Image (cartoon, helix red, strand yellow):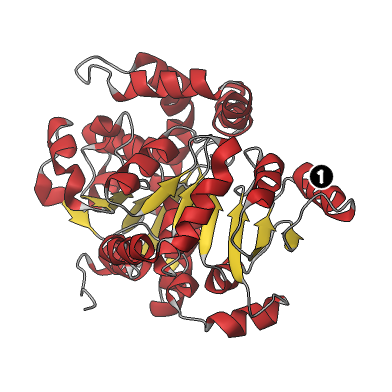
C-alpha cells in the first residue's frame, strides 16, 4: 500500500495533520509506504514556485501581522466569490506552478491513496483526474476541512473521493459548492494521538514544575508566534482569580525575551513559566485549566481532545475568526473582544462554574479524538471502523 501525502507549509497546521496521519499509519500498518510532498518547497525550484512558497508562508504571516483587517476583508470576499467564475488568479499564482511536479510524483510513485492536507492539493488532484491522468484516477483521494468553516475555492476540489469534515454543520455549504454528500464523511481534524491520551493533571503539573495548588492558564501564540501576548499577560495582572501562566512562545524568540524581561523586572504579578518551541504541548494542556491564544483548527482539536476550554485572543486571522464564531455560537469557547478587558473574561471564566460545565458539555459534543485513526483507516482500507 503506497500513500502520498500532499501538504503546504502555511503555518504548521497542514504539516501537523500530515504528521498525525503518517505516524498513525506507520504504527498501524507496518507494510504501508508513505511519501510526503510539499506543493511548493519540493521538486523544481522555478521562480513561480518560489514566489508561491513565499506567499503561503512569509507573505501570509507578514500580512496578518501588519494588516489583519485588510487580510480578513479580502478573505471574506473570497468566501463570497461567485463560484461559477474561473479562479484565474488562484490558478496562475498557486495551482499552475505546483501541478507539473505533483503530476510527475503521481506518475512515478503511483500511489494507492492520496491525502490532501490543503485545499490546493485537492484542486490539483481534481484537475489531474479531470484531464484523465490514470494514476490519479486509480488512487483513493481524501481531503480534509481543517477548520470549523469551509475554505474558499473548495468548489474546485469536488473530484476527490472523500472530503473529511469536523462536523455535519457544513453540509449546506458543501452542497452549494457542488459536492455530493456521499463524498462527505465526518471524522474530525487529525492530530497526534497523544492528545487523546489522558494524563493526570497533578502528574503533568509535577513534571512541568508547576504549583499543584493553583489553576493554570496556558497561553499559546502558534508555531511561529502571533498576537500581542505580552500586553495580554500584563492585563491579566488585574485578575482577582489566583492562577499561574504557562506561555508557549513557539519560534517567536522576540516574545520569549520580552516576557522574560518583564518577569525579571517584576512587572508580571502572576507566576509565569515562559517556554519557546516545545514538543510536549499535550502535557502542558493536561496540566492546564484554560487555553488563551490563536485557535486554528488543529489547536482546537488538540485542546478539545484534552477537554481543555479555550478563550480566543482578539486578533484572529482568516478561518480562525470563523472558528471562534462557530464555537462561541455553541457555547464552546470565550472570546476576548477587547484586550484591555481580558482580565474580566478570564475572571468570569474561573468564577462561573455553570458556564464552565456547559463548555465542557459542548466540547464533548464537538471533539473527535479518533480522527487520525479513522482518516488513516479510510485512506488504507477505504472504510472506517468507528470507535464507540
Residue 353: name its quadrant.
bottom left
**Image coords of residue 306 (percent x, y):** 44, 70
Name the side, left or right, on which 59 lies relative to 369.
right
Task: Name the residue: 22% across, 57% down.
Answer: 186
**Image coords of residue 99 (percent x, y):** 42, 32
Name the side, left or right, on which 329 lies relative to 295.
left
What is the quadrant of the C terminus in the image? bottom left
Is residue 148 at all visible to an observer of this figure? no
Q: Who is closer to the viewer here, 293 or 61?
A: 293
Above or below, 105 against 369 in this view is above
Residue 151: name its quadrant.
top left
How many residues crowd mark 1 within 10 Å: few (<14), some (14–19), many (20+)? few
Q: Who is closer to the viewer here, 380 or 243?
A: 243
Q: Who is closer to the viewer here, 313 or 98?
A: 313
**Image coords of residue 315 (percent x, y):** 53, 34
Task: Name the residue: 44% across, 67% down.
Answer: 33
Task: Name the residue: 53% across, 47% down.
Answer: 344
Name the side, left or right, on which 354 lies relative to 221.
left
Task: Name the residue: 48% across, 36% down.
Answer: 337
Task: Identify residue for label 1.
Answer: 258
**Seen from this angle, which residue lies furthest right?**
265
Q: Who is closer to the viewer here, 155 or 4?
A: 155
Q: How many marks?
A: 1
Above or below, 353 against 148 in this view is below
Name the side, left or right, on which 62 lies relative to 196.
right
Q: Element at badge 1?
A: helix
**Image coords of residue 75 (percent x, y):** 40, 24
Amino acid at each position: 500500500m503506497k500513500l502520498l501525502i500532499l501538504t503546504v507549509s502555511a503555518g504548521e497546521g497542514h504539516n501537523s495533520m500530515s504528521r498525525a496521519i503518517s505516524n498513525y499509519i506507520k504504527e498501524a500498518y507496518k507494510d504501508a509506504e508513505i511519501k510526503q510532498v510539499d506543493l511548493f518547497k519540493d521538486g523544481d525550484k522555478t521562480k513561480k514556485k518560489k514566489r508561491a512558497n513565499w506567499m503561503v508562508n512569509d507573505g501570509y504571516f507578514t500580512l496578518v501581522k501588519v494588516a489583519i483587517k485588510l487580510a480578513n476583508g479580502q478573505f471574506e470576499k473570497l468566501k463570497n466569490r461567485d463560484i461559477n467564475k474561473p479562479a484565474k488568479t488562484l490558478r496562475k499564482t498557486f495551482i499552475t506552478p505546483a501541478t507539473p511536479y505533483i503530476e510527475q510524483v503521481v506518475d512515478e510513485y503511483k500511489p494507492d491513496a492520496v491525502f490532501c492536507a490543503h485545499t490546493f492539493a485537492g484542486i490539483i488532484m481534481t484537475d489531474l483526474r479531470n484531464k484523465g491522468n490514470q494514476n490519479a484516477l486509480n488512487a483513493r483521494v481524501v481531503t480534509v476541512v481543517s477548520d470549523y468553516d469551509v475554505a474558499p475555492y473548495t468548489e474546485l476540489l469536488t473530484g476527490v473521493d472523500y472530503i473529511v469534515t469536523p462536523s455535519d454543520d457544513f453540509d449546506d455549504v458543501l452542497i452549494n459548492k457542488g459536492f455530493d454528500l456521499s463524498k462527505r464523511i465526518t471524522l474530525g481534524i487529525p492530530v497526534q494521538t497523544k492528545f487523546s491520551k489522558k494524563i493526570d493533571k497533578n502528574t503533568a503539573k509535577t513534571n512541568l514544575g508547576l504549583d499543584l495548588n493553583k489553576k493554570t492558564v496556558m497561553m499559546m501564540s502558534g508555531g511561529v508566534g502571533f498576537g500581542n501576548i505580552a500586553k495580554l499577560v500584563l492585563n491579566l495582572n488585574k485578575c482577582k482569580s489566583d492562577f499561574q501562566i504557562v506561555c508557549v512562545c513557539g519560534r517567536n524568540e522576540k516574545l520569549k525575551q520580552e516576557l522574560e524581561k518583564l518577569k525579571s523586572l517584576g512587572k508580571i504579578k502572576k507566576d509565569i513559566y515562559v517556554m519557546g518551541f516545545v514538543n510536549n504541548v499535550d502535557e502542558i494542556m493536561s496540566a492546564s485549566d484554560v487555553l488563551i491564544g490563536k485557535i486554528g483548527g488543529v489547536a482546537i482539536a488538540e485542546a478539545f481532545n484534552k477537554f481543555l476550554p479555550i478563550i480566543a485572543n482578539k486578533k484572529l486571522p482568516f478561518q480562525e475568526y470563523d472558528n471562534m464564531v462557530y464555537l462561541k455560537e455553541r457555547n464552546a469557547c470565550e472570546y476576548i473582544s477587547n484586550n484591555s478587558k481580558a482580565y474580566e473574561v478570564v475572571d468570569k471564566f474561573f468564577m462561573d462554574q455553570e458556564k464552565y460545565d456547559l463548555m465542557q458539555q459542548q466540547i464533548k459534543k464537538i471533539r473527535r479524538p479518533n480522527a487520525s485513526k479513522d482518516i488513516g483507516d479510510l485512506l488504507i482500507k477505504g472504510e472506517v471502523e468507528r470507535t464507540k
